[in-house]
Amino acid sequence: MPLCNMKSLLKEAEQKKKAVGAFNVGNMEMIIAVVKAAEDLNFPVIMQVAEKRLTHSPLDLMGPMMVNAAKRAKVDIAVHFDHGVSFENIQKALDCGFTSVMFDGSLYALEENIKKTSEVVSMASKYGADVEGEIGVVGGNEGGNVNHTICYTDPTDALTFSKRAKLTALAIAIGNAHGNYTVAPDLRFDILEKTAKLVDLPIVLHGGTGLTEEDFKTAIRLGIRKVNIATSCYDALTASAQSYFIKDGHHDFFGLNEAMIEGFYEKVKQHIHIFND
Ligand code: 13P
């Protein structure tokens, strides 16, 4: 069954010194596009939805669609709950059959982050699901109006956190931010390198939109094993829908549906190529 755990995908990525693309989805067209891109290129992926997006993409509708799409895929796909902050929603994602969840305790002090993340690890373990935690604050915001100020990860805190919270994967902050960057990010690859040497866990890079191919390759060389991509795929879908409407001739939902899938699919493919090059 190609619905799989995130842990196995990240382990394989570590062996190959590559990264798994983790693509945020918000509707059926995006799900279809991610699965098709992964199948066409024959690479595993992680499909995820962020808690902040549930107002547009309710979990009780999105969850079963994501899990069923992964189950019938021809390649391995892990289904992940991104940036969970409420235990209630994390529980719902686990009940839906998500194979991993993120608890984003990055705004808490270290001890509180360890405590709360450990509670999520114990919830997830009942389902055999994996947990991603975060230390340091990624800039911007995964939906909503708050624009978080970047707080670079302290590698020593990352070590303490990873040892005590019993995580599967660790998201760190090296100057990356969610959404389109208004100015080029100041990526602190030295922090990534130090953290990757200290911490015996797959490391996750959030805020993939706007990073260059060179940035991704450096990050992967230094130990990034999961890269989160949302905004650039959403933007590609929107641009593709706009182009469809600009074209002469008849327009209908079915044409729009195909245009949305095509735009998202091409952007996912582009990233899978970079992460596995
Ligand atoms: P972007 O929207 O910047 O690609 O970030 C995605 C992300 O990190 C989801 O958690």
Image (cartoon, helix red, strand yellow):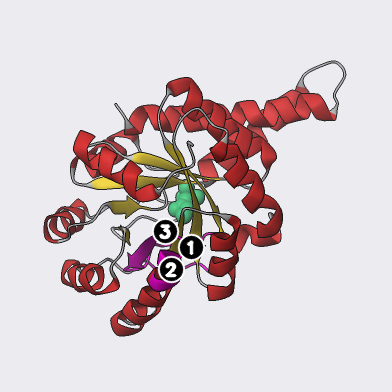
Mark pair 2, 1: CA separation = 5 Å
* Number of other residues with Cα within 10 Å of mark 1, as a class: few under 14, some 14 to 19, many 20 or more: many
Q: Secondary structure at mark 2?
A: loop
Q: Is residue 110 above or below residue 18?
A: below
Q: In front of the other: label 1 or label 3?
A: 3
The mark found on residue 104 in the picture is 2
Assess mark 1: CB under 8 A from ligand 1?
Answer: yes
Give whichever of discs 2 and 3 has the lower sequence position.
2
Marking on residue 128: 3
Q: Are marks 1 and 3 in contact (CB under 8 Å)?
A: no
Q: Secondary structure at mark 1?
A: strand
Q: Which mark is residue 207?
A: none
Foreground mark, 2 or 3, reads: 3
Q: Which residue is mark 1?
A: 83
Q: Which circle's residue, 2 or 1, is located before the other in the chain?
A: 1
Structural distance between the alpha carbons of marks 2 and 3: 19 Å
26 sits left or right of 50 in the view: right
**Few, some or many residues within 10 Å of mark 3 (<14, 14–19, 20+):** some
**Residue 230 % position (x, y):** 52, 46
Q: Is residue 94 left or right of residue 13?
A: right
Task: Judge the density around disc 2: few (<14), some (14-19), many (≥20) Cα neighbours within 10 Å.
Answer: many
Q: Which residues are magenta?
A: 122-150
